[in-house]
Image (cartoon, rainbow, N blue to C red):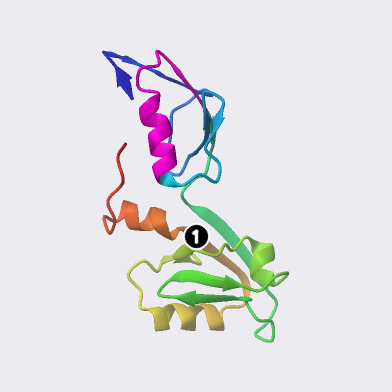
Amino acid sequence: MMHGARPIIEHVPGRLSIGDQIMSINGTSLVGLPLTTCQSIIKGLKSQPRLRLNIVRCPPVTTVLIRRPDLRYQLGFSVQNGIICSLMRGGIAERGGVRVGHRIIEISGQSVVATPHERIVNILSSAVGEIHMKTMPAAMYRLLTGQEQPVYI
């Protein structure tokens, strides 16, 4: 946001990055509020000379390490079109950091961004030992790949 020619945003050192979540503005919590309510709050602050943001850094890519001793151990998650849609509580995937709603973008150093669903399932179902994966929230993936347009306020 700009007011005249000077920025009006203050927050912890650094800048807002992709994936960061604004938790509060000038002491007003945005946690759990619908997007339209957050937009109204922000628009109502346009005349303020300064804004104080409380943010939580959420890097877009999460690194996951699943330790699967052998094929007898279930991975403990379901995937549909590259997106993790369910997770078995207490399973090896949950312990490794797998998150529901994340898109798998890499498995053991190989990009799976353009890989068909069946191939991703085959790679995962036959993998043993340390399985390194990189994931990101599906909504973030859609924004970064131009499948969705951001909502500007």
Q: Residue at the right extreme?
A: 90
Check if residue 44 falls in the magenta segment: yes
Residue designated by label 1: 134
Residue 101 shown left or right of residue 143 in the figure: right
Q: Where is residue 104 in the image (x, y as percent from the top left)?
A: 46, 65
Q: Is residue 33 above or below residue 92?
A: above
Q: What quarter of the picture does the C terminus occupy?
A: top left
Q: 21 above or below 66?
A: above
Indicate left or right for 90 with 153 as reference: right
Q: What stretch is highlighted in magenta?
A: 36-53
* Image: 23 above or below 136: above
Say whether residue 57 is magenta. Answer: no
| Residue 64 vs residue 60, the one in the foreground | 60
Which percent across, then down, holds residue 16?
A: 43, 32
In the rendered structure, which amino acid carries the disc numbered 1?
Lys
**Marker count (numbered):** 1
Residue drawn at x 33%, y 52% is 143
Q: Where is residue 77 in the image (x, y as percent from the top left)?
A: 59, 74
Quadrant holding the N terminus = top left
Q: What x and y, as percent, mark residue 32? A: 55, 46
Other residues around mark 1 within 10 Å, as few (<14) / some (14–19) / many (≥20): many
Considering only vertical position in the picture, is 43 above or below 104?
Answer: above
Q: Which residue is drawn at 52% across and 64% down?
A: 133
- Residue sitting nearer the eye, 12 or 106: 12
Between 74 and 29, the residue placed more toward the observer is 29
Q: Which residue does the image show at 34% across and 58% down from the upper left?
A: 142
Under tag 1, what secondary structure?
strand
